[in-house]
Image (cartoon, rainbow, N blue to C red):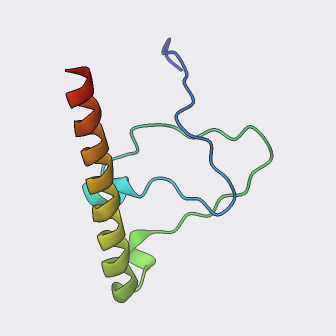
Amino acid sequence: MDGKRERRLVTMTPGMSFGEFALLTEDPRSASARAVEETRCQEVRFSDIADDIKIKLLGNLARELSRRLTREARELRILG
């Protein structure tokens, strides 16, 4: 890992997804994912998703981003 310390940020369970925020920025993911047991993943390209589902997906991503920013702002107020 290029001398960087590895940290577990989240433990995922079957049915969970990752990499959704990269859809918004079109940038590569900012973190890597590593399985600790045999795992099967499926890649879904944004261009392959039907337009009505894209709208719903982007709305859900916006809500999740809002929740995360609100939580982080609250944590900063507590620390600051």
> Does the rendering let one see residue 64?
yes
Q: Residue at x 29, y 32 (%)?
A: 75
User: Residue 55, image x and y in percent?
Assistant: 31, 80
State the image quarter where residue 79 is shown: top left
User: Residue 50, image x and y in percent?
Assistant: 40, 86
For the N terminus, the image quarter is: top right
Measured along the vertical axis of the image, is residue 74 above or below residue 24? above
For the C terminus, the image quarter is: top left
Measured along the vertical axis of the image, is residue 18 above or below residue 54? above
Query: Would residue 80 appear left or right of 10 to someone viewing this image?
Result: left
Query: Would residue 50 appear left or right of 72 to someone viewing this image?
Result: right
State the image quarter where residue 24 is shown: bottom left
Q: Residue at x 69, y 41 (%)?
A: 35
> Does the rendering let one see residue 26?
no
User: Residue 59, image x and y in percent?
Assistant: 30, 72
Most foreground residue, 51 or 76: 76
Residue at the extreme front = 78
Residue at the extreme right = 38
User: Residue 77, image x and y in percent?
Assistant: 20, 29
Measured along the vertical axis of the image, is residue 11 above or below residue 60? above
Query: Would residue 64 appear left or right of 25 to someone viewing this image?
Result: right
Count of numbered circles in the view: 0
Q: Residue at x 44, y 78 (%)?
A: 48
Measured along the vertical axis of the image, is residue 45 above or below residue 74? below
Query: Would residue 11 appear left or right of 50 to someone viewing this image?
Result: right
Most foreground residue, 47 or 52: 52
Q: Residue at x 30, y 63 (%)?
A: 63
